[in-house]
Amino acid sequence: MALNDFLKLGTKALEKALKIGADNAEVFLLNARDFNIQVANQNIDTIKLAEERGLGIRVFKDRRMGFSYTSDLNDTAVDRVVEQALANSLNTAHDEYLTLAEKMENYPTLDLFDQEISQKSVEEKIELAKEIENYAKKYDSRIKITERAAYEDSQYEIWIMNSLGLNGYYQGAYCGGYALVVGEEKGENQTGFGMQYSLKYKSLNPEIIGTDAGRRAVRLLGATSISSQKAPIVLEPYIATNFLGIISPALSAEAVDKGKSFFKGKTNKRVASDLVTLIDDGQMDDRVLSAPFDGEGVPTSKTVLVEQGVLKGYMHNTYTAKKAGLKSTGNGVRGSYRSTPEVGSTNFYLAPGEIDPQQMIKEIDKGLYVTDVMGMHTANPISGDFSLGASGIWIENGELTRPVRGIAIAGNLQELLGNIDGVSNDLTFFVGKGAPTIKINNISISGS
Amino acid sequence: MDKKQLKEILDTALLNGGDFAEIFIEHKETTSIGCEDRKIERINSGIDAGAGIRVISGDSTAYAFTNILTEKSLQALAQVTSKAAKSGKNKSAIDFTTPKPLVEFNIELRPDKVSVEEKVEKVKAADTAARSVDEKIQQVSVGYGDVRQNITIANSEGIFVEDERIRTRFICNAIASDGSSIQTGFSSLGGTQGFEIFKERDPKEMGIESAQRALLMLSAKPCPSGKMAVVMASEAGGTMVHEACGHGLEADLVQKSLSVYAKKRGQKVASDLVTVIDDATMPYKYGSFRYDDEGTVGQKNVLIKNGVLENYMYDRLTAGKEGRKSSGNGRRESYKERPIPRMTNTYIASGKDEPEDIIKSTKKGILVRKMGGGQVNTTNGDYVFDVAEGYLIENGEITSAVKGATLAGNGPDTLQMVEMVGNDLGFAIGTCGKEGQGAPVSDAQPTMKIKELTVGGTGGNGPEINRDFKIRRM
């Protein structure tokens, strides 16, 4: 289908919805091509090519909303889902805050489509994945197994249009590489990974990805436990982003409205140490989740959620914004054409500080440099309670000394945010979440 | 698409050689209903249809999919995948045959024949019931979902399978707060069933159960930490078996030496009391099917028998590498993914002990009555899972409820430490994640006593990108 055909199809679906009785309607269309290559031991394990397209339609009738989607874009199927969406709306709750995004004259221009991603040959991409594996294996002779090394990319087009006259389109592409390798010593195995995702083919660096994976796979070999104690912990950026994965949903206005967030009722109050600034920015340069507009057609924006430890606001879509008497922050995120726009983060990060991570470690007498955690998805986003399995490297007299595992760190996210005592300057992104190395005081570490 | 056209597509896929070609065509219709804040917030339904073509050549797999289901587009797709092949035979089988399944599902009330109003009614009933339990119940969310998936699978070895799978699930989550603390409780139901699933369990009951669980946790004491005996009640579900050994018995991980159970066939890996079974043929369970996603008949596989590792779970690719037959565990989330070895309904078989005796025999320990989510690092076998409802056992008596407990252990160690196995069996449903693909599964276990686990949480390392083996309770 040509570009114009999608536009026509969307317009037709909108017209049909209004014709059969909807008060308002909104169409979302996706057209994507994905490529993925996985290698192990310099052989191609899997090569995958995908083309996907689909349409999702929200209809509004008497302030009730219905949704339906289809991957089949022929006229009959589209007609059927439009009717289904209207039928679905008859049974949902009346809600005066249900609304559509207003027409926009202009959207920000972002550099989201790197031609090179589509121009590079399959052979070159395979070579890149192989190089990643080579760098990982080269890092240390104890790297014995490659689970896989991979390159992947995606090129996509998105349309959104609604009956208020809103009409948006953009084209984007991203690429990434990663490796998962296993280090082996004396019958003990440890997995390590390295990854990079970018909007620019050129910025993928197989050496960094491979070396990271290799380093992570061997650094915990020979780990032992430690005795239970209270000590400061240092989270490397990846682990800090794991925590952000639990904190970010709690900053959605929807979670707050529904009493499902520990940030409820804390606007303009201190929620973290003054070193903590949390930002969601849908327009960042060279970030994979950047876009001119969100899943409702609202321009994305930079939203400071927590500024120097004080809660400034929440992430909104049009619904939560209207309810709160505010403007949408452009956080109406869609997982795909198969789902409705829900409040969600774009590029969500903890702003960097000034200190070097090495210097931060140097200033610690005794503490734990945390490199891996387990069970993060079991943390409770409502109460903030967490209990995690952890491993890492023990810090003594400012030096990283020996690997430790089989320990647990438990606590509460609210306390943890308050105890952040150092934020370094090495902000690193892992897809949609970014964080620098951080130091947290006074954590209960249970060991043997 | 008729058989002749499918054969032509397979021939194109093998044009440049290759050992195996397959086409998977899927048409899936779903309905989901969400209620929160006392409101039916969303009713979503839709169609997702597409096809994936796979060519295996030596150790390499080429996979491509499209959701344009015309013969022209599928031929083009076959062309793309054919390019990856280097050598091998290049003819598909002459005639298709359809294997006979070991189980049949009789769907009484197909979801497409039940009105949206009736579905909404069930959701509202659970919401009202949960909220009426206590004024401390501050929020309730209820979700209903049904899936009708029609698949066609044809491969160059002559397998042709058509099937329809119908699944229904229902979940109720309650949040209780007393002003200072917030706790959650959930209750879920799911099966390879239609709307008749609600004859089995009343949504009202599930609403009440989730609310009571949240309230109980509100009054619970913080869980003590340290090493102690753990009794898992049968109603706790089987997260432990899923994490402690299930993933590690999947042949892809075993073959890549990414599992602690690699190279252990025929060896003692668990206490004599432990028999682990994966069974896709259990009537109406959430992880059941007639055929897996490669057209292999779903079957019952004994993985560990009286403590001895008997078998791993295979798909075609991993089975082929060992000159075996697939065990019927090749599953995929949709036409967008290639199949990989996955669990279906996994359980530890019942033993001889009375559940009450198991509790009575415990001096000091934790009783787990409901498990939450979990995660495993298959490379070293370390796992964690959280306890959604737990109690202290003191001198053989269940005393107070405890909150915030996480259990951590090592799979092989835990299985060796099983001391008593009850004569009961209880199931739970979940969506298991592996390589980013979700699969409906159920798991089960009898009441069991494990000599010692770390309570409060401990574990090893596990990167959470692309290879996390998590199960989310739903």
Image: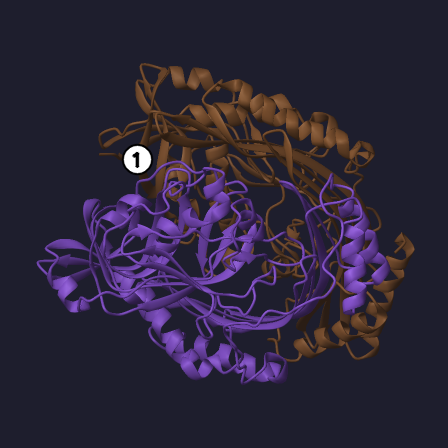
Residue B82 image offset from top left, x and y in percent: 77, 46
Residue A76 image offset from top left, x and y in percent: 82, 73
Q: Colour of chain A?
A: brown
Residue A93 figure quarter = bottom right
Residue at 13% x, 66% y is: B357
Furthest-left residue in this view: B395
Residue A28 image offset from top left, x and y in percent: 76, 59
Of A390 and A97, nearer the camera is A390
Chain of the residue on which disc 1 is drawn: A
Q: Quadrant of the N terminus of chain B?
A: bottom right
Residue A128 seen by the camera = yes
The chain coloured purple is: B
Relative horizontal placement of residue A40, taking residue B50 as reference (left or right): left
Of B367 and A289, nearer the camera is B367
Relative horizontal placement of residue A332, taking residue B257 as reference (left or right): right
Residue B135 seen by the camera = no
Of A313 and B252, nearer the camera is B252
Amino acid type at mark 1:
Gly
Relative horizontal placement of residue B17, taking residue B129 as reference (left or right): right
Of B335 and A33, nearer the camera is B335
The residue that label 1 is drawn on is A406
